[in-house]
Image: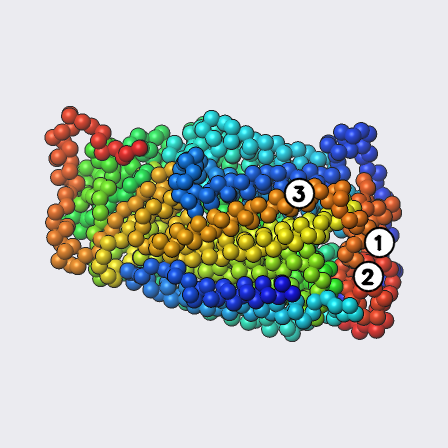
């Protein structure tokens, strides 16, 4: 009998825990509330199935537990019942998959005119790069990375010279503006993860990955690394600040371009090379 | 429709080959140590797996201590923490679950359940175990090697797995890990070929494929899958070993490590992930399918009722096995692979839910109108259904590509896979041990200790892993040595982490009771007799318990399917598979 009680407690307790516990997702700050919606649908469908199966088991144990003289029924197959159950399951699965695939289509379709921002991961800090006045990110190459050029930008590419480079600092984004995050790593796998944005993507050395989002509210959000990248993994934090248009422009005007940074590095090149190397 | 349930004597042809004489051991060494008897090899596999599993259990305690009480234990630094989680995961998935289900239960049950005298290649079977033991020893050696074991996470993703930012990356850890896996795959292949050939060629007369117990179907299908999937792991390990030792660049692009340009270039880290998960996803089912099979037999036997929808169950196992080879990239939705793959892999992944759900329905429908004996194997089977359904349903979150995006790499994933391929299969292992221990030793396991073990393990494990999903929902990432300060993590989440740690310590301690029971009952358990559960399958019909070398005096002949429980009109509520004629079927309608 204890089994029946525990089974009922598991079913009811899990639902109550879901509804009453204080642990829920952090308020969203991007356009990906579709993801949250799909997740809610999934919670409902799977929750109903879980409760139904566990309560049915509890009923079976209560009703058909062994008592002297009992004998089980003999029913090897029941094609009709099996057919209905398989059909119902297929419907439930389709009800979760269909909205999921629609939202995924949005997720992989970057809107025209999305601003580009590059995030560069290395053990264990974040750097960022914004296109300069030309609106284009210049080319880069891991082989070109030096202490003075920590993102490996192409000095011979005019598009790169005016790029805004933020080493280990904060990234600012403009609220309401779609942005395509281009992700690059110079050493191991990382993953650019801001819980409030919902979206995340791995950064893989040797290739450029991406995702897009539209920040929907201003505020300061934490960037975490979500792909194990060595012992410093949990310390690899950063900050994204979503600004209003005016605040964003004010911030942007204070940032330095690649060529400005190069000029500065050139003046003290002889004094100390290598200070731009990441901390161990 | 073909009747799978029973036939008459005349359908069974004469033996096609003569009974072959087995190799007979001449000494204690060849009888118990370098044994070619599948039953001894099974016990060797199981003992080794449980022993290394205890190491994994202690590692899980250590990592939980750090997560529940960050910084309270000075010796658990970040390096050690990552070494603990890596070794815990690898041991549990490969060296415990795979080895115990296939090497342990496979070896013991396949010949006995099919009415064979032994595996068809006993010598290769023996080598399989010794290579497995060697693989375990190499793995254990990494704890004592300079720099300690690898801390790359059980997925061993390059480049970090072979770089200096990861424990063991530039020391011996990763080399020993990869070597151990290579040895494991070689050893497993010897055993696996054996299981497959034995199932296909070693069945006794009358044991058609569609009369095999689902336990054998599960182990057989899992073994076929493992033979196809492990080669991917094998080549991935060899290639990474070359990258690490010889300086090749299979998985290594141009890299600047801590400000220094490395010599590598041109390789692809994602290639490793494809190879790893081409093995890794079937691996989930390599563990799950034997559990599915075994739990079907436990439920049927202890509910005294035929398994509901046997043929559907067989096809579900085969279909799941086949589909599991085209879902691997659902582990890589946010890996940076072409995002359009997401459409394909989300669809295949959710399709696999249908045959899986059918299996669940058939288990609970077997309970319906049964005669449920709440024995320990039945309790563990019920607990398996609860945890498997829970973990399977959260798989629908993670398999549905867009829902996976916020949840991947968070504690939700940790909770999901522990529920579905940690807790659930291990509950089946426990149920199976309580079920078959009487056959292996001739004695029952102690009931009181078993009850304590069951309740603490089931309730405790659920309390550990169910709330853990919600930590992931908050956004707490996995594989964090310490969460530290984060605005989106409320203080109450840390309290929850403390609770989970305390539960983990308690559940772990309950396993000591189980271990004690295993040893104590060898001498002090109640005498079991040959067929204590009144079961139909052949292993319970052996002339001796425990069965001696060669299993049978005269090979049994099979006349019916494995599930003739509570047949109307029969005197007993079970009819063994080797009982001839249509005894007890007088009143039954022909279907």
- Image vertical order of residue B518 relative to residue B540, above or below: above
The answer to whether residue B47 of the structure is visible from this angle is yes
Q: Quadrant of the N terminus of chain B?
A: bottom right
Q: Position of residue A229 (x, y in %)?
A: 38, 40
- Number of residue marks: 3
- Tell me the SS state at disc 1: loop
Mark found first going from the N terminus, 1 or 3: 3
Q: CA distance from mark 3 to mark 2?
A: 35 Å
Mark 3 = which residue?
A: B516
Question: Which mark identifies residue B557?
Answer: 1
Residue name at image x 32 percent, y 55 percent: B488
Q: Nearer the viewer, mark 1 or mark 2?
A: 2
Chain of the residue on which disc 3 is drawn:
B
Q: Position of residue B480 (x, y in %)?
A: 39, 45
Mark 2 = which residue?
A: B575
Chain of the residue on which disc 2 is drawn:
B
């Amino acid at each position: 009998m204890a089994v029946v009680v525990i089974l009922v407690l598991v079913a009811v307790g899990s639902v109550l825990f879901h509804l009453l516990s204080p642990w829920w997702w952090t308020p969203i700050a991007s356009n990906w509330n579709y993801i949250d919606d799909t997740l809610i649908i999934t919670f409902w469908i799977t929750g109903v199935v879980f409760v139904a199966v566990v309560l049915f088991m509890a009923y079976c144990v209560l009703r058909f537990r062994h008592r002297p003289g009992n004998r089980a029924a003999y029913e090897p197959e029941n094609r009709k019942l099996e057919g209905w159950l398989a059909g119902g399951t297929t419907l439930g699965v389709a009800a979760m998959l269909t909205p999921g695939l629609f939202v995924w289509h949005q997720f992989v379709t970057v809107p025209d005119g999305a601003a580009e921002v590059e995030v560069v991961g290395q053990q264990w800090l974040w750097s960022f790069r914004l296109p300069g006045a030309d609106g284009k990110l210049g080319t880069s190459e891991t082989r070109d990375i030096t202490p003075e050029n920590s993102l490996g930008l192409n000095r011979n590419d005019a598009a790169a010279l005016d790029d805004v480079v933020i080493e280990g600092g904060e990234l600012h984004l403009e609220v309401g503006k779609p942005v395509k995050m281009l992700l690059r790593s110079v050493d191991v796998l990382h993953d650019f993860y801001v819980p409030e944005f919902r979206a995340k993507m791995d950064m893989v050395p040797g290739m450029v990955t991406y995702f897009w989002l539209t920040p929907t509210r201003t505020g300061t959000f934490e960037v975490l690394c979500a792909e194990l990248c060595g012992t410093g993994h949990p310390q690899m934090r950063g900050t994204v600040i979503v600004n209003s248009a005016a605040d964003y422009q004010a911030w942007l005007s204070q940032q330095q371009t690649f060529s400005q940074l190069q000029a500065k590095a050139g003046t003290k090149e002889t004094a100390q090379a290598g200070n731009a190397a990441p901390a161990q | 429709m073909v009747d799978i349930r029973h036939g008459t004597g005349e359908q069974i042809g004469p033996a096609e080959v003569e009974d072959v004489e087995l190799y007979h051991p001449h000494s204690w060494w060849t009888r118990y140590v370098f044994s070619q008897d599948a039953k001894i090899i099974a016990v060797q596999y199981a003992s080794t797996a449980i022993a290394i599993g205890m190491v994994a259990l202690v590692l899980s305690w250590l990592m939980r201590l750090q997560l529940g009480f960050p910084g309270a234990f000075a010796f658990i630094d970040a390096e050690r923490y990552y070494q603990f989680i890596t070794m815990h995961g690898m041991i549990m998935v490969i060296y415990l679950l795979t080895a115990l289900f296939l090497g342990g239960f496979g070896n013991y049950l396949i010949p006995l359940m099919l009415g064979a005298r032994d595996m068809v290649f006993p010598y290769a079977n023996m080598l399989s175990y010794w290579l497995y033991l060697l693989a375990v020893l190499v793995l254990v050696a990494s704890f004592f090697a300079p720099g300690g074991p690898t801390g790359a996470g059980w997925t061993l993703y390059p480049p970090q797995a072979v770089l200096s930012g990861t424990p063991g990356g530039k020391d011996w850890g990763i080399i020993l890990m990869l070597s151990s896996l290579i040895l494991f795959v070689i050893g497993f292949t010897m055993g696996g070929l054996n299981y497959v050939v034995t199932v296909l060629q070693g069945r006794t007369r009358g044991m058609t494929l569609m009369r095999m117990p689902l336990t054998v179907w599960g182990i057989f299908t899992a073994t076929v899958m493992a033979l196809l999937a492990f080669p991917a792991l094998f080549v991935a390990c060899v290639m990474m070993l070359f990258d690490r030792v010889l300086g090749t660049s299979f998985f290594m692009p141009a890299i600047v490590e801590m400000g220094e340009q490395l010599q590598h270039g041109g390789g692809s880290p994602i290639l490793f992930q494809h190879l790893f998960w081409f093995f890794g996803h079937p691996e989930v089912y390599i563990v799950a399918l034997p559990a599915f099979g075994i739990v079907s037999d436990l439920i049927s036997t202890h509910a005294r009722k035929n398994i509901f929808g046997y043929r559907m169950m067989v096809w579900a196992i085969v279909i799941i096995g086949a589909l599991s080879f085209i879902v691997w990239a659902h582990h890589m939705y946010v890996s940076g692979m072409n995002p359009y793959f997401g459409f394909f892999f989300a669809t295949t992944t959710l399709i696999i839910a249908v045959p899986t759900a059918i299996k669940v329905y058939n288990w609970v429908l077997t309970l319906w109108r049964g005669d449920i004996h709440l024995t320990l194997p039945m309790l563990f089977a019920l607990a398996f259904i609860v945890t498997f359904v829970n973990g399977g349903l959260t798989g629908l979150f993670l398999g549905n590509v867009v829902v996976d995006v916020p949840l991947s790499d968070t504690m939700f994933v940790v909770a999901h896979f522990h529920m579905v391929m940690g807790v659930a299969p291990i509950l089946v292992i426990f149920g199976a041990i309580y079920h078959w221990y009487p056959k292996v030793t001739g004695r029952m396991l102690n009931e009181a200790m078993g009850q304590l073990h069951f309740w603490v393990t089931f309730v405790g494990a659920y309390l550990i892993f169910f709330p853990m999903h919600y930590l992931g929902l908050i956004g707490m990432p996995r594989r964090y040595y310490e969460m530290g300060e984060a605005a989106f993590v409320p203080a109450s989440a840390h309290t929850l982490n403390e609770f989970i740690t305390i539960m983990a310590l308690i559940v772990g301690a309950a396993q000591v009771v189980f271990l004690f029971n295993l040893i104590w009952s060898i001498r002090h358990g109640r005498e079991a007799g040959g067929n204590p559960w009144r079961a139909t399958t052949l292993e319970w019909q052996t002339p001796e318990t425990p069965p001696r070398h060669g299993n049978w005096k005269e090979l049994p002949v099979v006349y019916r399917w494995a599930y003739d429980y509570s047949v109307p009109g029969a005197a007993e509520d079970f009819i063994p598979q080797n009982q001839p004629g249509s005894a007890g079927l007088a009143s039954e309608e022909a279907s």
